[in-house]
Image: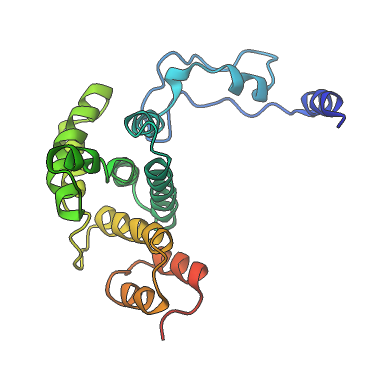
């Protein structure tokens, strides 16, 4: 009700933001972006920025939605794992490169499910680890913008994301914790199972904080 007037008023009240950087959040140049036009409201400018300005993780997220077309459960799972991993990485103060690797791996961590089902007629964690890296490597190569080192690290994380042991590598640990945050809810795990996972799997401050926020005091 009164939507048109509200939108017009918001546009009139808009205060343009400072000059937008020509780099994405990982420090890479944004192709096709030449800076804001004079006198153009920043909200209007954001609506008209070309699609190619999206950063690499945005492109990968959309590619994974296309890959899982018609499977909302897997799309929802991937999106949630990525959201938690991204937030946890920032909470832990990861450097930009490690944050990028973590977010990319979170988006493709389950990419081996479909390949496993097509090849074996079923899937499980070990088959995901076995079949996922090759599919991810092809996708990352097709999208472009990933170095060989980045690709190999992402594929290594896919190949180990169901291998649970104490790990000092933050991208690995946070990926596992983000996946558990989602799986514990989606699988409707019992309080006892949550306690066991908290004790044996979760190590980071951000992961423990999120787990306890979701389930209360599980450290009994």
Q: Nearer the viewer, residue 104 or 1?
A: 1
Q: Is residue 175 above or below residue 206?
A: above
Residue at x-position 12% and y-position 46%: 130
Callout count? 0
Q: Is residue 139 above or below residue 186?
A: above
Residue 167: x %, y % from top left: 20, 64
Q: Is residue 152 visible?
A: no
Q: Nearer the viewer, residue 3 or 22?
A: 3
Residue at x-position 43% and y-position 44%: 76
Would you identify the image quadrant in which residue 115 lies? top left
**The N terminus: image quadrant:** top right
Q: Is residue 160 above or below residue 146?
A: below
Residue 72: x %, y % from top left: 43, 40
Q: Is residue 135 visible?
A: yes
Residue 95: x %, y % from top left: 34, 48
Colour convention of the picture: rainbow
Query: In the displayed structure, does residue 137 sit left or right of residue 7?
Result: left
Residue 65: x %, y % from top left: 38, 33
**The C terminus: image quadrant:** bottom left
Would you identify the image quadrant in which residue 193 lies? bottom left
- Extreme residue in the bottom direction: 220
Query: In the displayed structure, does residue 24 sit left or right of residue 45?
Result: left
Would you identify the image quadrant in which residue 183 lies? bottom left
Q: Is residue 111 above or below residue 80?
A: above
Residue at x-position 44% and y-position 13%: 32
Q: Nearer the viewer, residue 87 or 132?
A: 132
Residue at x-position 14% and y-position 42%: 131
- Extreme residue in the front direction: 121
């Amino acid at each position: 009700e009164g939507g048109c007037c509200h939108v017009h008023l918001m546009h009139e009240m808009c205060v343009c933001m400072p000059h937008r950087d020509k780099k994405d959040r990982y420090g890479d140049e944004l192709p096709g972006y030449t800076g804001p036009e004079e006198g153009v409201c920043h909200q209007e400018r954001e609506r008209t920025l070309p699609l190619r300005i999206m950063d690499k993780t945005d492109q990968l997220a959309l590619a994974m939605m296309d890959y899982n077309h018609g499977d909302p459960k897997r799309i929802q799972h991937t999106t949630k794992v990525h959201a938690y991993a991204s937030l946890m990485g920032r909470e832990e103060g990861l450097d930009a490169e490690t944050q990028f690797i973590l977010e990319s791996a979170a988006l493709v961590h389950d990419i081996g499910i479909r390949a496993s089902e097509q090849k074996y007629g079923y899937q499980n964690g070990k088959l995901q680890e076995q079949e996922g890296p090759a599919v991810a490597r092809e996708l990352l190569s097709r999208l472009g913008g990933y170095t060989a080192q980045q690709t190999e690290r992402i594929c290594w994380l896919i190949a180990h994301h169901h291998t649970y042991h104490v790990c000092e590598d933050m991208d690995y640990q946070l990926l596992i914790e983000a996946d558990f945050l989602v799986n514990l809810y989606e699988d409707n795990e019992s309080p006892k199972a949550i306690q066991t996972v908290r004790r044996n799997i979760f190590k980071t401050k951000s992961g423990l904080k999120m787990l306890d926020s979701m389930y209360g005091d599980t450290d009994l």
